[in-house]
Amino acid sequence: MSAIPPIPAVQTFGLTRTYGAMTALNALDLTINKGDLFGFIGSNGAGKTTTLRILATFLSPSAGRAEVLGYDVVKQADAVRHVIGYMPDFFGVYKDMEVTEYLDFFGACYKIPTLKREKTVSDVLELVGLSEKKGALIGALSRGMQQRLGLARVLIHDPQLLLLDEPASGLDPRARIEMMAILQELQRLGKTIIISSHILSELQTLCNRVAIIEKGKLIYSGPVQGVRDQMASGLIYWVTIPGDTSKAIELLKAHPEISEAVAVDGQVKVTFKSHDVDPGFLPETLVLGGVKFTGLWEDELGLEEVFLRVTRGETQ
């Protein structure tokens, strides 16, 4: 039985945005599928916010087009606004309002009936973990709680797609962890989420797919593991060997599947010629060669290292 092909939630076709002589977004072709928790990675000025603002219908593209859940972001902007929730990196809150008043106000803006609004507000507050702050003044909330309130606001009309621009910006480690846990729960509930962030270590474990953008151009889009495999020349393993490493290096270098074996801080770094090779021969080669080892593990290329390898730090 063949697998069901993914259904696109967002598609861009040659999406371009210029400001005078400056090109902020350069012919972006991007597909994000329904149910994705999609990480959008790039330096400041790379084009992430411009892309999100076009998808949110706040900016018009200079060329190309974009579709959100089948709706054209220019020709069918009103339809797009009803199916998305957009949270910018900086958003205003009315600090003298109570939490429930704030959310009720936005519920009314989306024309949610009065009788339904109370339950809707209660539900979104529970989802973001702010139920105990219903009567609190927004100005008295911590930065992390205000971010969660901002997320509750974009959830008030039950959008299918969330566009979150740096949602963990300025949060302490505990607040970031809480925010990421909420996003995972929203994905489990069927939401499609696009999140731009500089906290690459968290995107690595949070997202199932990522895109890397630099100077308005798409460099990579696909699974997180895919970008690691694409950037690493081959599998890398580390071997801990007590004492002299020279015999181990000699044995490993002689194997046809190994491209390099070098000593690094008392350990041996072994680089295979490809990702397709079965590394099972590695311990066997050492044991048969009379070399004792006390540790063996695969070196996973982290998303931060991948990002540094594929980008040059260029901005507009």
Image: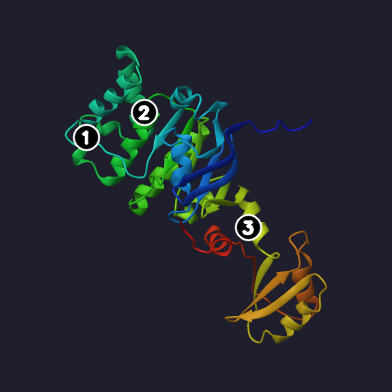
- The kind of residue on which mark 2 rests is Val
Q: In this view, does 234 lie above or below 61?
A: below
Q: Is residue 292 above or below residue 207?
A: below
C-alpha gap between disc 1 and disc 3:
43 Å
- The kind of residue on which mark 3 rests is Arg
**Residue 47's spot in the image, x, y percent?**
48, 49
C-alpha gap between disc 3 and disc 2:
36 Å
Circle 2 crowding by C-alpha within 10 Å: few under 14, some 14–19, many from 20: many
Residue highlighted by disc 1: 94
Asked if disc 2 and disc 1 are in contact, CB closer than 8 Å, the reply is: no
Mark 1, secondary structure of its residue:
loop
For image coordinates 53% across by 64% down, the residue present is: 312
Image position of 80 (left or right of 223) = left
Residue highlighted by disc 3: 228
Q: Nearer the viewer, residue 142 or 281?
A: 142
Q: Which of 236 and 159 is in front in this view?
A: 159
